[in-house]
Amino acid sequence: MHHLAESELIINSRGAIYHLDLRPEELADTIIVVGDQDRVAKVSKYFDRIEHQFKHREFITHTGYIGTKRISVISTGIGPDNIDIVLNEIDAVANINFEAREINPEIKKLNIVRFGTSGSLQEDIAVDSLVVSTHGLGFDNLMHYYVHKTTDEDSDLIKCFIEQTEMDTTLTMPYAFRSSDSLISKFGSDFHRGITVTAPGFYGPQGRELRLKSVSREHINKLTTFSYKGNRITNFEMETSAIYGLGKLLGHECLSINVIVANRILRAFSKDSDAAIENMIKKSLEVLVA
C-alpha cells in the first residue's frame, strides 16, 4: 500500500484532517456543503439532534440526524480553490486510514449536495427560483490540475460551447462534468434544470464592472443563447464545476442546488434573499430525507 507522507496528508494533534478538523467518525455519508458559515446553522436547525460541531478557519461542520438520516453540513467559503480543499479532505476522512496513512481497500461513496446562491442567466428564471445543475461548466481551471479523461459527452458539450459562444480559449479552457443521475432524479418540477457555469471570481470573471472593465462582459451575454441537446445555461456561480469534477474523479454522487438571488438579464435582485435561502433549504431537505 502507498504510504502518504506527513507533508501530503496533514493530521492535527487530535487526529483530525488539517483544514476541516474532522475525524472519520464525525462525518456522515450524506454531506451538504454551503458557502456561507452562517448557513450551516440554518441547515442544522432542522436536525432532530446534533452529534458533532466543529469550527476551524472558515470551515464549520455540524453532523446530526433528521429522523434516522445522518447528515453533515459543512461550510466551504467562496470559490473553487476552497472546494479543492473541502472535497479532497472530505474524501480523505471517508477513505484514508489516518493512523496507517494508507488509502482504505474499500472506497466509500458519499452523497455531496451543494446548497448555494447564484445568478440567473435566463429571463424566465426569476429571482427566488430554485435550480438543480445538470452539468457544471467550469471557467476556473481547477480540474486542469488533475489527471482525468473527459467523457465523449462532456468533450462534445465543451466543443459546442466554444463554437457557439466563440469563446477566447486563451483566457480559459472550459471543462464540464455531469451531476449525479441518482440525486438529480429526486428533484421534480419545483426545481429548474440546466447547465451551471462556474467562474473563478464574482466581478470581472462574471462580467460585472464597477471601476474596472471586464474582458468577459460581451462573452457573458452569449451564455444565455447557448443550447446543448435541449440543455441551456441557467445560472452562474463559483463552486459547482469544482464539486462535480472532483466528486466524479473521487467516485462520489454530487448535486448542486441553487436559489436564484439575482437575474442578470433583468438586472434584478431578490427582495428577501434570506427567505429565499430558507425556502431552498427546507424544500431540498424534504427531498433528500424522503
Image (cartoon, grey):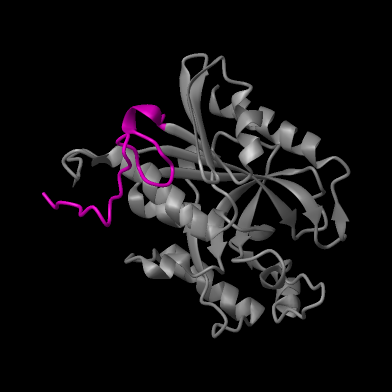
Residue 245 appears left or right of 123: left
Q: In which quarter of the image is residue 143?
A: bottom left
Frontmost residue, 117 versus 45: 45
Q: In which quarter of the image is residue 228?
A: bottom right
Residue 137 appears left or right of 165: left
Residue 256 point in image, percent of width and height: 57, 46
Residue 21 point in image, percent of width and height: 41, 39
In the picture as drawn, the residue positioned furthest to the front comes out as 13
What is the total number of numbered labels drawn onto the structure image? 0
Q: Is residue 53 visible?
A: yes
Decide whether the magenta segment is chiefly helix, strand or loop.
loop
Frontmost residue, 97 versus 180: 97
The reply to whether the magenta stretch includes residue 7 is yes
Frontmost residue, 48 versus 148: 48
The residue segment tinted magenta is: 1-29
Residue 48 appears left or right of 246: right
Q: Is residue 55 above or below residue 124?
A: above
Name the residue rendered at 32%, 44% in the picture: 92
The reply to whether the magenta stretch includes residue 208 is no
Name the residue rendered at 61%, 58% in the picture: 238
Frontmost residue, 236 versus 158: 236
Q: Can residue 230 be seen in this view?
A: no
Q: Is residue 115 above or below residue 145?
A: above
